[in-house]
Amino acid sequence: MENIIYLDNAATTRISPAVREVMEPYLDGFYGNASSLYSLGRESAKALHKARADIAEALNCDPREIYFTSGGSESNNWAVKGAAALMKNMKTQGKNHIISSQFEHHAVLHVLLALEKFGYEVTYLPVYEDGVVRVEDLQSAIRPDTGLCTIMQVNNEIGTIQPVAEIGALCRERGILFHSDAVQALGNIPLDLSALNADLVSLSGHKIHAPKGVGALYINKKIRLAPFIEGGAQESGKRAGTENVAGIVGFAKAVQEAVSGAEAKRAALLPLCEKLYKEIMKIERVHLNGDMEQRAINNLNFSFEGIEGESLLLMLDMAGICCSSGSACTSGSLDPSHVLLALGLPHEIAHGSLRISMSKYTTEAEVDKLLEALPGIVNKLRQMSPLWERITKG
Amino acid sequence: MLYSEKVMEHFAAPHNVGEIENADGIGEVGNEKCGDIMKMYLKINTGIIEDVKFKTFGCGAAIATSSIATDMIKGKRIEDALKLSNKAVVEALDGLPPAKVHCSVLAEQAVKTAIADYYRKQGIDPTPIVGEIPEHCHGDCSNHD
């Protein structure tokens, strides 16, 4: 796997050597259950305590506001379901309305769809061609019975940044709970949990070079969220289950590295992002999906007219390059990605999308190899595409 | 999702790609909204498919099924080409993931549509020979299986 060019870091990332190193003692000698009284257990409890403090320091919040989970999907489920339950019990009883956006991650959207079946009303804000939610739209969507707003910080498919601090401020002013899925933000844009005006923030480890299966939910200390997994007293009784100590220790290291390395990463990726954009836009009939300015620079998403995304991915894979696409064939459903459709793209253009997502390990040589392979692959697929023939011959 | 080696072989180096000038029959099925279009060109001489070419917009399975279907009808008599079933295409590819079986249906329909076009050009009503070709997709993808 040494020669693989991995440009799918919004899907998952490789574990950093430092993360692996801090995890190793907990995979090996320190296997104690953190709830046990003897010293082996206390070592695990100490490690959890330190991990929580390290994350709180890196993200500027109180350690008691960090609750470890299995990752982004669990955090999103807990946050949205928990907040929905809380809405019903708020002082101003009977709040029944939730505001979100059309292009949230499925771990939020599918929860909202389930809540609609239980009688909640949900407004999905538009994201326009640039892939950005408007605060004015939120303002006009707010109703007396609005109890929760959930808007992601950075979109996972197209990388656009949402104005969450303003959204959070507005929600706070209007007494509305605010949750933000920050899974794609962490490590890619500055994340200050105290400045975000959020009540709930979802975080994931495997997007920032920690292992899969660990993440966290930030719960503002003013919020009393009910437990999501009932059972033991772990996580202050809020999330039962013996803690994934090694994973959590690795996650904390990854958060520290993401925050301390953010500037260097940005400096390294900015020219690569610009190069990718400049070179790929030279290809005929290609579109960048989402705004170029309001973007986490690790993530670029293009649509190539006349070709289908899965074929594109398979050919890139044959050239040793890993990317992803929002075509129906790769989304596992019949429709192309809901994110690309929310931008107003016609189906046939959404089918031809390609997401390139970089990490701190991405090199210019890798970007060059993609740029070398891509035009030929696009051309080859277009040459055999009757749709391309129709587009070009009118 | 895992493709068989056979699918990958045909995808990586598809056979019979292109167009035939002055083709005797042309069939196009699928639509861009669903993400797959197959267009098949036939050269027919004395009831035999002398040459066949295709162009496909679609996923790996769409390209592979087009490629193998053209192989399977090339040099065959029209009657035999009409017997090509989507099941035979799937078998020849050593299987397709369930979500991709519709691509093999498209390939079968592309062959039949091209043959129907051939008969129409000859002034012959194709329906008694080729049968009704169900429209695979109406644009809302509801017919996908």
Image (cartoon, coloured by chain):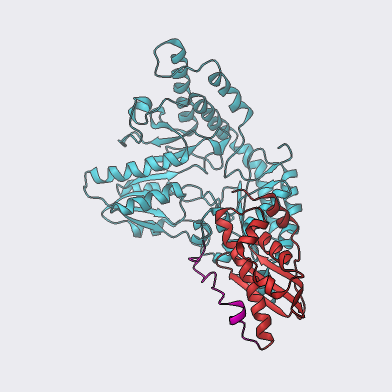
Residue A51, magenta (yes or no): no
Residue farthest top in this picture: A38
Question: Which residue lies at the image location 45% right of the left edge and 18% below the top edge?
Answer: A46
Residue A87 lies in what quarter of the image? top left
Q: In this view, does A183 lie above or below B96?
A: above
Q: In this view, does A60 lie to the left or right of B30?
A: left
Residue B23 picture location, percent across and down: 74, 79
Residue B125, magenta (yes or no): yes
Residue B45 picture location, percent across and down: 78, 79
Q: In this view, does A51 lie above or below A4?
A: above
Residue A129 picture location, percent across and down: 52, 62
Q: Is residue A385 above or below residue A123?
A: below
Q: Is residue A198 visible?
A: no
Question: Which residue lies at the image location 51% right of the left edge and 48% below the top edge?
Answer: A154
- The magenta stretch is B124-145
Nearer to the camera, B136 or A223? B136
Q: Is residue A334 visible?
A: yes
Which chain is depicted red?
Answer: B
Residue farthest bottom in this picture: B123
Which chain is depicted cyan?
Answer: A
Nearer to the camera, A333 or A230? A333
Q: In which quarter of the image is the N terminus of chain A?
A: top right
Judged by its main secondary structure, the magenta piece is: loop
Q: Is residue A351 above or below residue A314?
A: below
Q: In which quarter of the image is the C terminus of chain A?
A: bottom right
Q: In this view, does A121 lie to the left or right of A275?
A: left
Residue A225 picture location, percent across and down: 32, 37
Question: Which residue lies at the image location 56% right of the left edge and 18% below the top edge?
Answer: A28
